Image (tube, grey):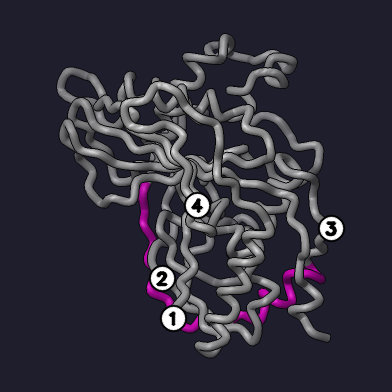
Amino acid sequence: MNTSTQTQVTSIPLTAHPLRFTVVAETPITFHDFKGSALRGALAGALRRSYCPEWRAAETDPLHQALCPVCQLLSMEATPEEGGDLRRPYALRPPEQAQSHFAPGERFTFGLTLFGDTLAYLPYLVLAVRAMGEEGVGAQNGAGARGRFAVERIDAVNPLTGEEKTMLAPGASTVHTATAPVTHAQVLASAARLAQQVRAQENLLGIEFLTPLRLIQGEATVKTPAFFPLAKQVVLRVLDLCAQHGGGRPDVVLKRDLYPAADVVTLLADQTSWWDVAGYSGRLGRAQQLGGLVGKACYQAASWDALLPWLVWGEVVQVGKNVVKGCGVYQLLRTA
């Protein structure tokens, strides 16, 4: 039986809206090793303080949770009715710069990706980013204050088509809600182009893990870039996002539609390392391990046709633990 034909998924009812925020430091900003944790913590704090009247309550009323957009963005208490793991309607992409200190006047960018057909959360996130810049991010200075920034511009960016739309221009005060959504049709087109390229190079595919990839298999943390657990978690995340924030869970049977293709992929080269980094969880009230794999790995398969649409979606939605803090960002390398 032709595995690539058998496992091809024709419809993923999900839309993603990647946004890029360009900000300018107004006072010195110093980040610790992983910027994503500090940015997400500041974002969550700004959302709660500005828009959730019950953010100080020891227990939140279920009716309030059902209606409050902040609780929907941040709460981990609910159990999804559709099954699967609870998936937040957004993911964060930390700045790509290696530098951890930004002097006044220096710029950096970070991303937020919203999932779903509606943009109901967009105004809250935009205003919260402005608020977190005013309240401060990063490490405290000698006076106990954090570094402040101003939002210079906001752009909607589609990584698959290259389309960009200006949502907030420099010097403007009005945010336009037009985005550049990622759709499944675009994912399929990108996967088809990539399939042609990898076929021309002996079906070699490279993946670069740009931020810590932390996968859990069973109860164990995966510390090698084995392909099967990566592919499995990408598919599970996409299916859950479809069920909870898209048009419903697609009819995919993992043991039939994924496992046979993923199980025969070979890891040829491993240039990854484990980045043992930690952050702080306000929800848990303690330090949280964010460490994961970073670096490059090269894989080979008899055919990538069945797997590439899922992997392209994974580039968009991120994968693994702590994606709301910027973990699990990877890039498919067109030349392995």
Q: Is residue 201 above or below residue 68?
A: below
Q: Mark 3 = which residue?
A: 251
Q: x, y (%) of residue 177? A: 55, 31
Q: Amino acid at mark 2?
A: Lys
Q: Around disc 2, counting alpha carbons within 10 Å, would you say few (fewer than 14), some (14 to 19), or many (20 or more)?
A: many
5 relative position to 73: left or right: right
Q: Amino acid at mark 1?
A: Ala
68 relative position to 35: left or right: right
Question: Of label 4 and label 3, which has the lower sequence position?
Answer: 4
Q: Quadrant of residue 102?
A: top left
Residue beneath the point at 80% across and 55% down: 250
Q: Around disc 4, counting alpha carbons within 10 Å, would you say few (fewer than 14), some (14 to 19), or many (20 or more)?
A: few
Q: Report helix, strand or loop for mark 4.
A: loop
Q: Around disc 1, counting alpha carbons within 10 Å, would you say few (fewer than 14), some (14 to 19), or many (20 or more)?
A: some
Q: CA distance from mark 2 to mark 3?
A: 32 Å
Which of discs 2 and 4 lies nearer the camera? The answer is: 4
Q: Mark 4 = which residue?
A: 163
Q: CA distance from mark 3 to mark 1?
A: 34 Å
Q: Amino acid at mark 3?
A: Asp
Q: Report helix, strand or loop for mark 3.
A: loop
Q: x, y (%) of residue 9? A: 76, 65
Q: Is residue 242 above or below residue 142?
A: below
Tell which of 180 and 21 is nearer to you.
180
Question: Is 23 contained in the magenta span?
Answer: no
Which of discs 1 and 4 lies nearer the camera? The answer is: 4
Which of discs 3 and 1 lies nearer the camera? The answer is: 3
Q: Mark 1 = which residue?
A: 269
**Contact check, label 1 and label 2, Cβ < 8 Å:** yes
Q: Report helix, strand or loop for mark 1.
A: strand
Magenta stretch, residue numbers: 255-277
20 relative position to 181: left or right: left
